[in-house]
Amino acid sequence: MKLSATIRGSTFGFGSVKEVLARANPPKSGDDLAGVSARSPVERVAARAVLSQLTMAELRAHPVIPYEVDEITRLVEDNLDESAYNAVKHLSVGQFREWLLDSKTTGATIRSVAPGLTPEMAAATAKLMSNMDLLVAGQKCEVVVRCNTTLGLPGRFSSRLQPNHPTDDVLGILYSTREGLSYGCGDAVIGVNPATDTPESTAEILRELHALNTRNGVPTQNCVLSHVTVQMKALDLDCPMDLMFQSFAGSESGNKAFGISVRLMDEAHDKMQRLRSSKGPNFMYFETGQGNALSSDAHHGADQVTLEARCYGFARRYKPFLVNTVVGFIGPEYLENGPQITRAALEDHFMGKLLGIPMGCDACFTYHAAMSQDELESLKVLLGAAGCTYLMSLPVGDDIMLNYQSSSFHDIPSVRGLLDKRPTPEFDAWLHAREIMVGSKPGPRFGDVTVLR
């Protein structure tokens, strides 16, 4: 295994596969903060040259966190599909990239090898891709899942309706929900970030959302994004829970900072399997985001793209219905500006889809990041073109509880119209029955909250 390259007469040597992965990463403020980024553009080119020649077998043999010290590494290694792995193990990262981009490589073929890929393989491939490459390859990777509705079908583009309220006022949450539904949003999930993380408030919100959907025949699923242990207690209160949520990190120590472990998530999944109110086989919801492990000093000297991919390696154990990267939410310490946030969103979407995850994105930024509204709107269109499963949707794109900028109720139908995409089939039929949409165009009841009781 060669870990050096000569560029314009200068030789660059790297001490490990982990270092090669980090130095090959496009510029990210989080990698600079961690001290793992390339020290010059030429060193970045050298690292990419080395990375392109590493094989999939070599990446599997050298995870960025050793097997002996990290349960995420053990989970990935112990559950890897050997038959799928054998189909790609001989390929270099450069060859695998070319294979993904080849016009003859289909989504079905990519799905067949996904169970044999480690997160490090997905991250390595992303580092050799341009933004256009990430769009082309990501668009091929179709992942179809079912809860109460069917997500990820070709030609579909969905949204999470996010009716957050700063005091968890249920009437306020319901008002925002009705408005969002009237604009054709919410087919992925109606998901509330709670201000009060208690079983009682979680159960109350879920009951009221369930009642709203039942009265109006809305085909979707509900979720309150409290901590997984709180949701488990809420289930004991006999509330209707369609999806169970948790945030993930890409290392065992990062997940400890979230108050979770593989064992706890296994227990939560088993409980949800028995007590959920949803119909389909996919009923878990996870959120991630580049930089979350570094923010808790749990990155083990690895770069944030590779650690993000490891979140997806963890998530696929539970066959989730939803996963999304909250791409610009953690802050400019990790993704400094519009180009970095855009790049991270496209990387995350590609890596998640490549590993078999139904990947969405919260295209967003905090108010102290150097990103403009125009850059954010461009990113939403790019993600839609890349086959992103869903985006967020909230009033005017401004979250009054979490204080960040995301996608508005108007953005979702706009992106659908631009790219000729529709919501989930079940939700699409409901929108037409209520005259909210006519074909792919807004109908006479579009934006009319009185269409819902």
Image (cartoon, grey):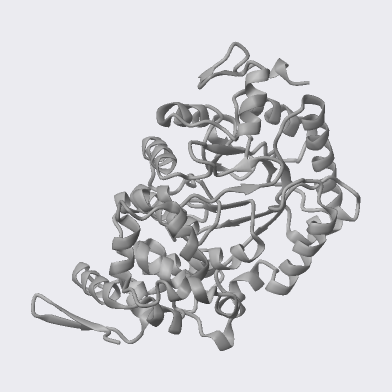
What is the quadrant of residue 81 in the picture?
Answer: bottom right
Image coords of residue 418 (percent x, y): 41, 28
Q: Position of residue 361 (x, y in %)?
A: 51, 48
Q: Nearer the viewer, residue 397 or 280?
A: 280
Horizontally, residue 391 falls left or right of residue 266, namely: left
Position of the N terminus by quadrant: bottom left
Q: Is residue 121 left or right of residue 391?
A: left
Give the image quarter of residue 182. top right
Relative to 276, is 225 on the left or the right? left
Q: Is any part of residue 450 visible from this angle?
A: yes
- Residue at 38% across, 62% down: 29
> Residue 125, relative to residue 253: is it above or below?
above
Camera-nearest residue between 449 and 276: 276
- Camera-nearest residue between 78 and 161: 78
Q: If the image is split into quadrants, where does the C terminus sit?
A: top right
Residue 420, x across and y down, in percent: 44, 29
